[in-house]
Structures are given as C-alpha cells and as structure tokens.
C-alpha cells in the first residue's frame, strides 16, 4: 500500500518524477441544483487502505479507485471482501452520498493505478504501473524489468474492456490519461529507454524520456511524441482542448529537451514545459517555464482552448520566459497555479507559500469556469487573505479560484498526522475531493469529524 506523505516527498526530491496524476473528470455536467454535502471514510481495521483516483460520471456518480483487501465504507454495514480477487477496488457514490456500486476487479496482483479519467460514454480510463506479473480481469500482463506501464479501459461500473502493459529495461510509467470527444485516448508518462506503448515506439536509449501516445478507442496506437532530453524528462499531465488539440505538460533536468522538433534550453535545476499538438500529432507550439530554480508540474487542465497548470516550485522560476511578468521567487517549496492562452501567452500565476512546504497536486475545473486546486502543506499556508496552520504533520488544502486567478474560497482537511489528496473533481459546480489519512480523527471542511476504520484510510468529501 502507498504511504501517503513520505513517498510523496521522496519522489519529489529524489526521482524528479513526482507524478501525481492530473486526471479526473475532464468534462463537467451542466449546472443544476447543487448536490448535498457528504463525507465517507473507506478503510478496514485489519489493514491499510489507499485511495488513488477520482472521476465524476455524467449523472454525478463519483467513482473512486483504490487498493484494499477488505473495504468498509461509512454508512455501509457489510464490508466488501476482496479475498481471491485483485486488490484494486472501485466504488461509485451517487450525488447524495449513497453507494451506486462497489467492486473489486477480478484477477491477481495489484497494478498501481496513478490516475483515472473517463470518455464521453462514461468508460473509465486508468493508467499507472506494475512491478510483477498481473492479471487484471481476464488479461495477463507479464512484467519485464523494474516498473512497467499499465493502462486499461473499463466500463462505467469498472468491468475491463481492454488492458495493456508496456515496459523496457528500466522504470516506465503511465502518469496521466485523457479522452477526446471521438473516444480516442491519450496517455503520457515516462519511459527509460525505448519502449513500445500501445505499439508506438517511445523514448531514447539510455535516457529517461517523457512520452505522449494517442490511441484508438480500442487501445491501438495511432501516433507518439517524445520529450527527448539531453538529461532526463517526464510528462505529467495531458488534456484535450475544445478545438480537438491535445496539451501535455512535464519537466526536464540536467540539460535541454527536444519536443515537437523544437529544442528548449534548461537554465535552472528543473524546468517545466507545456506542449500542444493537433489531433494528427503535428506540433502547435511549446511553453517553457524557466528560471534558476526547480519547477514540479503536477496538474494540467484545459478551459476551452486555454491551459491551466499547477504544481510546486523552489528558488526563482520564470512562468513567462518571453517577458519579466512571470518571475516569482519561492519562500520554501511553494504551490502554484498558472494560466496561459490558447496561443501560449502567459495570463497569470497564483502562488501559495509562507513557512514550510506547499505542493499543489490536484487540479480540476467547474462548469462555471472556476478552478479547483488541492494539495498539501506543512506548518502554514496562505491563499489570498486566508492563513491556515497545520493541525499535525501535513494537512490538505482546497482552493477555489476564479478564471482570472482571484481566490474565492479556501478550505482544508486536517488531522494530527498526514492528510494527502489524491483526486479532485466537480459536479454541478460542487467540489469533490478524495485522499488518504493516517490520523486517528479527520476534520473535514464543513466541520464534520470522521474516525477512520484503521491506521490508514481513504476519504471522500463533497461540498457545494
């Protein structure tokens, strides 16, 4: 099971591949009556439970994915027993918080699902990695070496439609996944060396590279693009624009990187990029986040044809290398959200940082055009005029921004240990958040206090 915060920080500092997925619901339903506030714990007294991803279907059903052996849910008298099946569970919550469905995916072995999205027909799309032989549904995946790419398409109640794996000689991973309106699927991540993802050759021998692969609805590959580094690179987020183009974000370190035939220089510890391609895979331009510091790209969404990115940074980062408008210095490790036009022009950046470290890890948009960002902070956190102080080691923050970057609301999930978000989404302009906690009691944004079932539980929270 994933340990929420220690592994999170290890990946940020050591691997340059903090790859919390930026999936979730890329489409929002039309505004309607706001659903009620509800909260649930997902856990077990005998073992740890990990919640990994969230997506909202067209009818407002919130689908949560995670890992467990036995799963208890607040308000449900009968636990879900995964004995003899895979440890990957999916639970659907109706807008009123009642359970729509709950299931373990049959099989053996546990692929580590990093993020989840959906297509227009409410099929679920997941991606991540696996480190041993896996059977997911009826599909057997043979592990190659170290860590391999995992991706699958499931129906709206989590029955597998197709399942794929890919791997080479080193660490390979699917980090984010998204669908276009015609059902085609985009997946991005990192590969070490050359790896065939959905049959498309990605990567560079001897290098950690970022990749973007387009697939047909049946999972067959169409084309690929690679963030080809002189040092190392990875892709961390993908989203489809209103005009049908696809946008991918990521980071690179050590030297320059080539994306879509254009070389981006590196002038700091770790630079970020946003690249756009048309539906046929032709490059449409890049955005570079430069500066002498380090930027960690963890979230990407589109609003129409414009781009919103989120993550964390340290030192001095230039969010607009074409002018002086985007130069920002972090206090420690600070969270950020930035917006760019469809032609790549910088519009604004909002940073959150005081003492301690902050990281924006989850990003969503509402039907009204607001931006939802979730993340973690230790010590204290400042957004607009609101200052939050941690109750324990690490708390979760939730910030609602207007499309212009104005802070509209600031909330938190708190406990005496660690509360770490793993997914954020919206339905009818409400906020939905899932995450993990190892505290003995969790205080949710509406003041509700929940007691976990065991030492490590997942949670879901919805508020208009």
Image (tube, grey):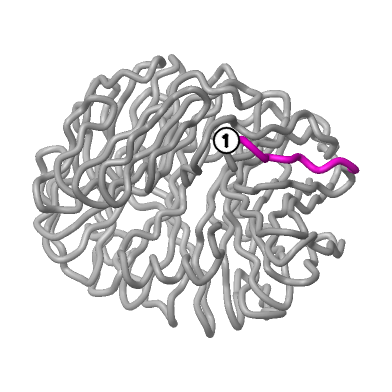
Q: Residue 127, position in %: x, y?
A: 44, 38
Q: Magenta part of the protein: which range?
A: 77-85
Q: Residue 166, position in %: x, y?
A: 29, 35
Q: Residue 375, position in %: x, y?
A: 56, 62
Residue 344: quadrant of the picture: top left
- Above or below, 137 relative to 414: above
State whether residue 399 appears in this view: yes
Which residue shows up at 66% across the image and 27% down it? 29
- Above or below, 412 relative to 219: below
What residue is shown with label 1?
A: 25
Asked if residue 152 lies in the magenta stretch, the reply is no
Which residue shows up at 58% across the image and 78% down it? 378
Side of 327 relative to 121 (left or right): left
Quarter of the N terminus within the rendering: bottom right
Q: Residues within 10 Å of mark 1 (few under 14, many from 20)?
A: many
- Magenta stretch, main secondary structure, is loop
* Closer to us: 170 or 98: 170
């Amino acid at each position: 099971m994933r340990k929420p915060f220690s592994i999170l920080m290890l990946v940020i500092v050591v691997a340059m591949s903090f790859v919390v997925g930026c999936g979730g619901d890329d489409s929002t339903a039309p505004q309607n009556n706001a659903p009620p506030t509800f909260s649930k714990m997902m856990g077990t007294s005998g073992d740890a439970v990990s919640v990994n991803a969230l997506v909202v279907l067209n009818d407002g059903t919130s689908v949560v994915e995670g890992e467990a052996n036995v799963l208890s849910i607040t308000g449900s008298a009968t636990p879900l027993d995964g004995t003899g099946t895979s440890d990957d569970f999916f639970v659907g919550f109706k807008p009123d918080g009642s359970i729509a469905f709950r299931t373990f995916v049959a099989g053996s072995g546990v692929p580590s699902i990093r993020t989840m999205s959906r297509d227009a027909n409410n099929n679920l799309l997941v991606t991540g990695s696996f480190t041993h032989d896996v059977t997911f549904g009826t599909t057997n995946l043979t592990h190659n070496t170290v860590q391999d790419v995992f991706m699958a398409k499931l129906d709206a109640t989590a029955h597998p439609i197709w399942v794929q794996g890919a791997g080479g000689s080193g660490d390979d991973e699917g980090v984010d996944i998204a669908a276009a309106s015609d059902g085609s699927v985009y997946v991005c991540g990192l590969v070490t060396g050359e790896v065939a993802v959905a049959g498309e050759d990605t990567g560079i021998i001897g290098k950690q590279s970022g990749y973007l692969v387009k697939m047909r609805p049946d999972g067959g590959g169409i084309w690929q693009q690679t963030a080809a580094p002189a040092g190392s690179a990875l892709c961390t987020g993908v989203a489809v624009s209103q005009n049908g183009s696809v946008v991918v974000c990521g980071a690179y370190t050590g030297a320059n990187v080539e994306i879509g035939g254009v070389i981006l220089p590196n002038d700091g510890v770790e630079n970020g990029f946003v690249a756009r391609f048309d539906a046929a895979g032709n490059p449409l331009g890049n955005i570079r986040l430069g500066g002498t510091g380090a930027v960690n790209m963890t979230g990407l969404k589109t609003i129409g044809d414009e781009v919103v990115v989120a993550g964390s940074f340290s030192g001095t980062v230039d969010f607009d290398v074409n002018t002086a408008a985007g130069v920002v210095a972090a206090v420690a490790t600070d969270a950020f959200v930035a917006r760019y036009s469809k032609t790549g022009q910088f519009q604004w950046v909002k940073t959150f940082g005081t003492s301690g470290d902050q990281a924006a890890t989850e990003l969503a948009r509402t039907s009204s055009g607001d931006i939802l960002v979730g993340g973690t902070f230790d010590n204290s956190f400042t957004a607009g005029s609101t200052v939050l102080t941690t109750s324990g080691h690490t708390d979760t923050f939730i910030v609602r921004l207007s499309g212009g970057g104005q802070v509209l609301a600031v909330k938190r999930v708190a406990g005496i240990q660690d509360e770490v978000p793993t997914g954020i989404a919206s339905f009818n302009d409400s906020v939905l958040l899932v995450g993990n906690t190892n505290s003995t009691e969790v205080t949710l944004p509406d003041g509700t206090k929940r007691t976990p079932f065991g030492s490590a539980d997942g949670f879901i929270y919805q508020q208009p």
